[in-house]
Amino acid sequence: MSVPAPTSAAAPAAPRAPQGEVAIRLEGLTKRFPVRRTWTELLRRPTRRASQIALEDVTCSVGRGEFFGLLGANGAGKTTLFKVLATLVLPDSGTATVDGHDVVRQAAAVRRVLAPVITDERSLHWRLSARENLLLYARLQGLRGGLINRRVDEVLHTVGLEPAHRALAGGLSSGMKQRLLIARALLAEPRVLLLDEPTRSLDPLAARSFRAFLRDELSGRQGCTVILATHNTEEALELCGRVAILDRGRLLAVGTAEELSREVMGERYRVWTRGPWQGVVAKLVEAGLVREYVLLPLDAGEWAQLDLRIDGALDGAADTLRAFADANVDVARFERLGATLADVIGRVVARRQGTSDD
């Protein structure tokens, strides 16, 4: 059972330039890839050309020192955008600049200031120690003489791997391997870091610890501009100052994590209650405080479980609880729910199409 409170659909969030200097600027960025065809299709229609859109007219800016999130499901275009920024893929149209350098016309300059962090652990040499991996990569980066050891020591300290610098890379935990990959990227002192789902192979506790490291060290002490690609809503909202939502190559919305969570999804709460809750909820909906409620199945006798969408942030939640108490309706639990990626994208798409039930 779902009962929404009728309101008009809002316009999608528009990209806005961040305050201060701009580190990355995208203008109408578009990329298509040819679609593979079977031999039968080639024989039947040899001249036909089909393509699949990876990025379509993407326009936004990222400020210097900003921790910016790209939120989208698999196939949304996050990896393609990273490859364009890293000068590995040429866009079909539009422009992209990194630290003022065009990714097509000034690719070498872009590579000097930007480092993609490849989260594939297989890119490490597992039979070399953590330090030996960094020494090898430092030489490949062109570092020479005493600068090599000094820079390796610095990045080992930065990522907290000094105690394990002699351990073989293959014997490190997944979290330590991720730190080693970031240390490798930091050797060249980049101004921009691209992180592609850095916690996907970590357990929940290790992922939480690693996110704290990313937030405090990279964006904090190092002052890097960090772009994080993820399909984990919790991760994006926890780490990023602003988030862009990509869906099938299209930029659906750009805004602060707080704005997107609140404005797109509203404040969602789950309440376990007992008593004549129907009258209380009906009054809250009529007053415009509760925008929608869903009765969920709960095999617990007289208790009912409700999902509520509440306006007014914490004040609205407090008013809702007060209404239950004033009506002498028991509340056993009352908790805020996080928004899933599917929820966020679904709401944004609905708003763009003018069919949202907000």
Image (cartoon, rainbow, N blue to C red):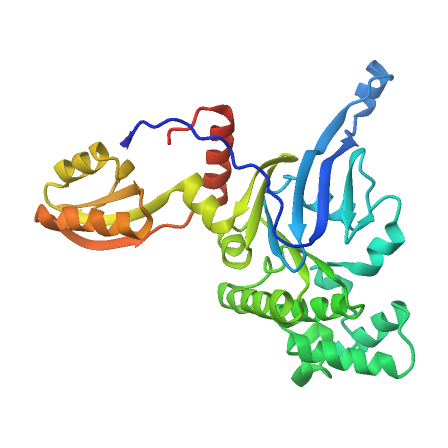
**The image quarter in which residue 287 lies:** top left
Task: Identify which residue, 295 or 228, lies in the foreground.
Answer: 228
Determine whether, in the image, residue 358 is placed left or right of residue 184: left
Residue found 64% across the figure and 67% down from its top: 218
Please state the horizontal and vertical placement of residue 87, each as a whole percent of the image: 82, 48
Q: Nearer the viewer, residue 159 or 127?
A: 159
Farthest residue in the front direction?
20
Inspect this view and state whether residue 271 appears. Answer: yes
- Residue 126 in percent (x, y) is at 76, 71
- In the picture, the quarter occupied by the C terminus is top left
Residue 300 appears in the figure: no
Q: Residue drawn 33% across and 49% down?
A: 313
- In this view, the residue farthest toward the left is 328
Q: Position of residue 323 (x, y in %)?
A: 15, 46
Position of residue 108 relative to residue 352, above or below, is below
Q: Would you say 322 lies left or right of 107 here? A: left
Looking at the image, residue 29 sits to the left or right of residue 331; the answer is right
> Is residue 50 positioned above or below 174 on the image?
above
The quadrant of the picture occupied by the N terminus is: top left
Number of disc labels: 0
Where 326 sits versus 11, above or below? below
Task: Identify the residue at horizontal 78%, vertical 78% (top origin).
Answer: 152
Residue 306: x and y in percent read 25, 43
Query: Residue 310: which quarter of the image?
Result: top left
Residue 356 occupies which quadrant of the picture?
A: top left
